Amino acid sequence: HDFSIDEELLKQYYEIKEDYLQKAAAYTININFLEMSQVMQHCYCLSSEKFTITESLIAGKEETTIIFCKYRRSEEALQQAFPNVKITTFAKSSYGLNLQFYNQIIYFDKTFDYSQRDQSERRIYRTGQTQDCYYHDLSGNVGLDSLIDTNISKKTSLLQEFKKELSQKNSFEVIMDAF
């Protein structure tokens, strides 16, 4: 499900991006891609349209929906907005829990970590599940979300994806294209 990031948050996203890129171009920092992407993603994690879409997806399905998020801010805001829905982070619930009484997952925040995504899907689609399972991704109108979606769909790690891109282009082109 595509959403448009709130204008002010989108502005902040591009300011963060530009700041990182300027510092990298001036050689004042070495870019840590994971750090940069998390800072950028964190700035729009509470975009209002994400809540609107989430509300429409859970309507009448509160008892069977689990929402995975990445950031504490997201978790707290979701718990307040949807008190009757299971809200959890990838770190807490993607491994080891049997959640087959849920049949719908909403990925409120994205993760580059394919193993977290894979394990979270397996929490509801397992022996004992009697319902069809539904998985919903919320994707913002920025290159970062597209990159994460592509990364997950290709089942590759962030590092592998950047290594591939870097072998074909220079690092500045990769950054500009990705974000």
Image: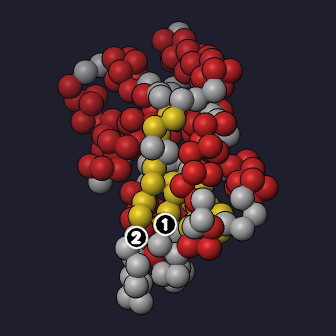
Q: Is residue 165 left or right of residue 152?
A: left
Which residue is found at the position 50% from the left and 63% from the top?
105
Q: Residue furthest left?
A: 168
| Residue 37 vs residue 128, the one in the foreground | 128
- Describe the element under mark 2 as helix, strand or loop: loop
Q: Residue furthest right?
A: 80
Q: Position of residue 25 (x, y in %)?
A: 48, 12
Q: Is residue 4 left or right of residue 174?
A: right
- Dot 2 and dot 1 residues touching (CB under 8 Å): yes
Which residue is found at the position 55% from the left and 15% from the top?
18
- What residue does disc 2 label? 133
Q: Is residue 47 above or below residue 86?
A: above
Check disc 1 and give the amino acid type: Gln
| Residue 65 vs residue 33, the one in the foreground | 65
Q: Is residue 61 above or below residue 28?
A: below
Q: Position of residue 134 (x, y in %)?
A: 41, 64
- What residue does disc 1 label? 104
Check disc 2 and give the amino acid type: Cys
Instruction: Give me the C-alpha separation between circle 2 and circle 1.
Output: 6 Å
Residue 14 visible in the shown view: yes
Which residue is found at the position 28% from the left and 28% from the top?
166
> Which quarter of the figure has residue 161?
top left
Q: Which mark is residue 65?
A: none
| Residue 151 vs residue 86, the one in the foreground | 86
> Which quarter of the figure has residue 40?
top right
Q: Is residue 94 left or right of residue 72?
A: left
